[in-house]
Image (cartoon, coloured by chain):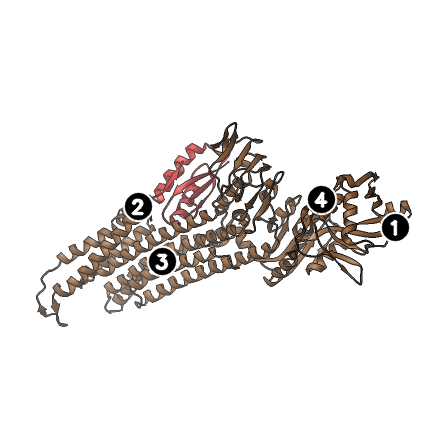
Amino acid sequence: MKKSYKIEVDCANCANKMEDAAKKTEGVKDCVVSFMSLKMNVEFEEGADPKAVMQEVLKNCKKVEDDCEIYL
Amino acid sequence: MNKKQKKMLIRIIIAAVLMIALHFAYEFLGGKQAEDGTVIEEALIREPLWFILYLIPYLVVGYDILRKAFKGILKRQVFDENFLMVVATVGAIAVALVEQNGDYTEAIAVMLFYQIGELFQSYAVGKSRRNISALMDIRPDYANLETEDGFEKVDPDEVAIGSIIIVQPGEKIPIDGIVTKGRTTINTSALTGESLPREAAEGDEVISGCINMTGAISVQTTKEFGESTVSKILELVENSSSRKSRSEDFISRFARYYTPAVCGSALALALLPPLFLLLTGGDPAWGSWVYRALTFLVISCPCALVISIPLTFFAGIGGAGNAGILVKGSNYLEMLSRTGIVAFDKTGTMTKGVFEVCGIHHAKLSNEKLLEYVAHAESLSTHPIAKSIVKCYQSGLVWKTDEKSGEAVPVPDEGIKIHVGDHRIRRERVESVEEIGGNGVVARVDGHEILAGNRKLMDLKGIAIRECHYTGTVVHVAVDGEYSGHILISDVIKPTAAEAVRALHEAGIRRCVMLTGDAKEVAESVAKDLAIDEVRSELLPQEKVSAVEGLLEEKKGKEALAFVGDGINDAPVLSRADIGIAMGALGSDAAIEAADVVLMDDDPARIAKAIRISRKCMRIVYENIIFAIGIKLLCLILGAFGIANMWMAIFADVGVMVLAVLNAIRALFVKKL
């Protein structure tokens, strides 16, 4: 399953870091963060609950970049 | 500028003013010493007061960086750029403090420029983001749903299929549909990049996203809003940035190693040379080496690299979109720039895909009269050939006969306007129409017996014909039992097709190959007219796929193969080629789905334009990569030898970023390509 979320982040490298952090989160199969369109496209693992997974993703992203936001 | 940016600007200005004021104050009040250290002039303000005073602008401009760096440390993010910036500036202040030279300005300036850079970046990116979305500003906000007393403004999402909506002049057409009332001119430029307006009247299909210019029309919707062209296109544009190109991947991978590597070298630079000097008995000169290491840290920020590449692609895709070329992702833009072989479909791509009368040969009567008779004779038929003859008659074309060959071709419109009314079909002129088993018709028009049909019909009636040596469908005509010439009907080559092929060759495309299901002669005559290099004709749809596969194997090096089709039953070929280009795809969901690049109108000249846009974009991408990495490496080398100071380091970081961003914006300008 794929979902797209709006994000808020200040710099391009921070967006890359968010992408890495999200990819490492359990339940996320793949993730692409586009700094230019401020979007995060997440592909979830089979059977994963997007809501719970996204909470984790947000937590991990906050860890690498304090100033970011994902609008869930 | 938003609130955040304004606040930052104010902080920068305050800090800059304070810093300059302090710098001059230090000159006058800091006291003077002779070279041997004897005091010439007593200082009015002494250390550590200077340090505290200088701390004020530093904190004004950099407190948020300090805070973020501190948080980063807590979360063990060592290569966080805030952290690096703090280490570099605090280090510089420490060096100044130890060496008692009062040179705090440098650290503050570094922080100041860093913040200016960040501000510029966020401003420029925000601005281009808005610009590019304005280019694609085709989203309709409302629909006027027809009600018993006038109309009502509703959300386009709420309009059911088959509803009647009213579109006023100046409004966007919100949903695809068919005009049921009214006549107007439609501006499709937001979708197709084509500036010539289109006429629409009752019964015509209109596409959402276009702007209604002159008259109010009623439209019966044929799709839901979510399925309408405008929604499909917006979805495509919004998702385009999620497919990253190899250059983008390269740069983010590079950034991942670059920062740690530079930090490592900074540490080595701070420790190894002084230790070496110490061991060999020289002066370790700690201060100088630490300072050089700190310059390294300033250069280690990867942002200039990381921002410029996606921004270039974003601008390139935005510019292409404005020209009516939708690119589904930066990877496709990159691939498109490497195109070496272009394969086309014939029908609908290089030709119009509709039958048109393109010649009247050996007419015994005047060309116009012959056409008039046949059009009337065929006026009751629903056959496409008959329809094209009637349509040709109604359009009031002027014919010009070549004396030698006796062949007439339509004269391109030279401003001769013939009233449409003069070319109306009058049913009362036609009597006793008889269709003869798919071979043609026999009818009486104005009392003359008109025989129009293929060779079989003429054989049947025992009329000798003149062969036509052109390819296409030939309608032979006999008036009152006497052969009176024939009308040639064929699929017409698009007016820009030859120019398009020439432009492709000019753009360095090595091979243009035409793939078609059509007969060999037809295909070859079209290819000859257009100067296409190769033709593969009489292909079944699945054979087209294998033809493309064959071409894929003949690719040289890194070049890519593009296939251009009109999207109707081309979907498998579109997806098999390196890049599938669908053209005239407005309203065809399957084509938009299967293609990587969508040309919004059906002008083949846009293929070359798309390639030129992609090349320009890639050139800027490479410029930015080489420029940004080059300057940074140069500054690193100069920094290591102590030639570059921190001022130069901050240029390597902020200056390069500003220039790279400005360069990236150039990709947006594609009008003249």
Report which residue position mark 4 lands on.
B424
Do marks 4 and 1 share a subunit? yes
Report which residue position mark 3 lands on.
B262
Occupied quadrant, residue B609: bottom right
Category of crowding for the residue at label 2, using alpha-carbon neighbours closer than 10 angstroms: few (below 14), some (14–19), many (at least 20): few
Q: CA distance from mark 4 to mark 2?
A: 66 Å
Judged left or right of residue B127, residue B207 is right
What residue is rendered at 34% in x and 54% in y?
B120
Category of crowding for the residue at label 3, using alpha-carbon neighbours closer than 10 angstroms: few (below 14), some (14–19), many (at least 20): many
In the image, which disc is placed on residue B482? 1
The secondary structure type at the circle numbered 3 is helix
- Can residue B240 be seen here? The reply is yes
- Colour of chain B in the rendered structure image: brown
Dot 4 or dot 2, earlier in sequence: 2
The answer to whether the residue labelled 4 contacts the one labelled 2, judged by CB atoms less than 8 Å apart, is: no
4 vs 1, front mark: 4
Q: Amino acid at mark 3?
A: Val
Category of crowding for the residue at label 1, using alpha-carbon neighbours closer than 10 angstroms: few (below 14), some (14–19), many (at least 20): some
Report which residue position mark 2 lands on.
B3
Q: Amino acid at mark 1?
A: Glu
